[in-house]
Image (cartoon, rainbow, N blue to C red):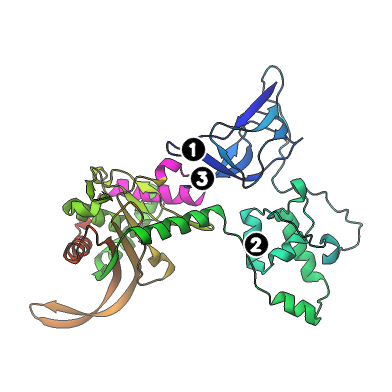
Amino acid sequence: MVVDVVMPKMGESITEGTILEWRKKVGDTIEADEILLEIGTDKVDSEIPSPNSGTLTEILAKPNDVIDVGNVIARIETDDTGATKSAPKIEPEKESEPTPQSDPPVSAKKISKPAAPSSEKTYYTPVVNSIAHKEGISQEELARIVGSGKNARVTKKDLLAYLEQRSSAPKDFSPASSVSQLSDKRVEMNKMRKSIADHMRMSLDTSAHVHLMIEVDMTHIVQYVAANEVNFNAQEGFSLTYTPFIVYACVRALQAFPDMNSSLDGTTIIHKKNVNIGLAVAVGGGLMVPVISQCEELNFLGLCRKVRDLAVRARSKKINPEELSGSTFSISNYGMFNVSIGTPIINQPNVGILGVGTIKKKPIVIETEQGDSIGIRSMMYLSLGFDHRLIDGTGGAKFIETVQKNLENMDLENLF
């Protein structure tokens, strides 16, 4: 019997999806739960498994098509009984025929073709675009590669083979070649990059951004992590990082300053019942902001586990779309990239975002009752971006100072 494959519903607010890449082509056999295609939404890109085993008989949507949820995008022929067939797995990007070992080496020119002018834009998968950008391959050069995918699409394997053979081919040092290598490269943004660009531009157009910075003495937390990281890792199976301490301190400050845990609807202030922290996570080709919901109900260990879980699943593309919305305040930790300070853009519809810099040892003046002295301390800059439509400078200053004090005076002995 024939089974329809429909565009899946990826979340309550998701009504459509974009076809990014088919992992199978018409005529291929596929097993149930084997990856059939990759789709993208405004919130996340996801790999979609096949609902049945059988043979892919029809593909009704091509890459870059935007399809409404519930519409048929492919059909699979199964047996009449619906029993799962045992079929050999076909790995993605293995669509071209192997070259016999007895054949002589092929020059780069033999696997390229003249670029034909076309009114339609050629589609390349994000991984192909990424490799081409890294290797300095222009769109014109990419168009000359003979693709082995459906409709002559250039696959990752095609591009890697071209790069390998191009590097071993004699170099052409003609003037025309030199000019070509120095020409500008034009690469279309992928869907995630477009979504980020639109969201950030909208935020700047919506909120009156103001930023404040403060320095925090993290010495006692650094020492605590160093003393407990081995036991923590043995017990939990992952490393103890500084991020849960920052989230913990921030949650307590948000409870004391409800305006910072709000959103604006025109001239109406919406105070949020729960504290839902959005954590910016760098992923391949962009950024995701998964949300830890109801942070006020979690103890410190619960925050550690949530931070770890969301970061791992975001980077492995296993995050659910529902987990990328509903934040009431966001944190961006650029310190992991050795950056000291920054001014992050507010994640709408939040009215505030905390930027976290790297921790560095510095000589600091230490004031005591016996007098001043200079000591080596582990210092960190925090920056607070807030919406001046709702939060004034005084409120922003008091909030970030509260976060600072929560970190510097944290009762570490009673965390767990």
- Residue type of the residue flagged with mark 3: Thr
- Front residue of 265/123: it is 265
> Do residues under tags 2 and 1 come within 8 Å of each other at their CB atoms?
no
Q: x%, y% of residue 124?
A: 67, 54
Residue 277 appears in the figure = yes
Residue at point 21%, 60% (across, down): 391
Of the 4 image quadrants, the one containing the N terminus is top right
Q: Residue furthest left?
A: 369
Q: Give the magenta range.
A: 300-323
Q: Residues within 10 Å of mark 1 (few under 14, many from 20)?
A: some
> Do residues under tags 1 and 3 come within 8 Å of each other at their CB atoms?
no
- Residue type of the residue flagged with mark 2: Ile
Q: Main secondary structure of the magenta part?
A: helix
**Mark-to-mark CA distance, 2 and 3:** 23 Å
Q: Is residue 308 magenta?
A: yes
**Mark-to-mark CA distance, 1 and 3:** 9 Å
Relative side of 210 to 177, left or right: left
Checking the image for residue 27, the label placed there is none
Q: Which residue is mark 3?
A: 41
- Residue type of the residue flagged with mark 1: Thr
- Front residue of 167/198: it is 198
Q: Which residue is mark 1?
A: 15
Relative side of 187 to 276, left or right: right
Q: Nearer the viewer, mark 2 or mark 3?
A: 3
**Mark-to-mark CA distance, 2 and 1:** 31 Å
Q: x%, y% of residue 106?
A: 86, 63
Q: x%, y% of residue 47?
A: 57, 42
Q: Secondary structure at mark 3?
A: loop
Q: Residues within 10 Å of mark 3 (few under 14, many from 20)?
A: many
